[in-house]
Image: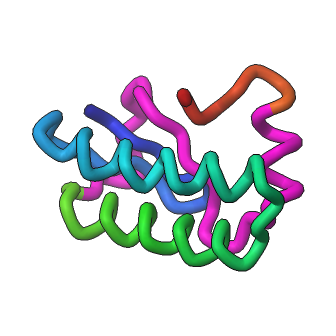
Amino acid sequence: MIVRIMGEGQVKLDDSHFTELNELDDELLAEMESGDGEGFGRTLTALLDAVRRLGTPLPDDALEPSELILPSPDATLQEVRELLSDDGLIPG
């Protein structure tokens, strides 16, 4: 699976990590829905850290189709809500 972190690049992850990442994504979604900006920031950091830890960065000049697109580390709850209101960049 290829994951893009906005503003950073792409990371290749083994599909076996999907469950762990999905759990963090579920937490992130719950915090978005409840408006918990502080929890959202913590969970987003944990999710991005997990992607970086478990994955292998692709070269900067590689442009592979991304199966998941994650917000940048400094994204706010409101910014991510706006992204999701368009076409939903992060699958639920």
Q: In which quadrant is the N terminus drawn?
A: top left
Q: Nearer the viewer, residue 61 or 29?
A: 29
Kindly identify the residue that appears in the image at 41 percent across and 27 percent down. 67
Q: Is residue 46 above or below residue 61?
A: below
Q: Is residue 89 left or right of residue 64?
A: right
Which is nearer the eye, 14 or 23? 23
Residue range of the region highlighted in magenta in the rendering: 57-84
Q: Residue 32 in the image: x percent, y percent?
A: 73, 53
Is 64 above or below relative to 71? above
Along the line of sight, the residue nearer the viewer: 24 or 89 = 24
* Residue 77 x %, y %: 79, 60
- Residue located at (65% from left, 31% from top): 89
| Residue 43 on the magenta segment | no
x 39%, y 42%: residue: 3
Image check: 57 left or right of 16?
A: right
* 92 versus 56 height, above or below: above
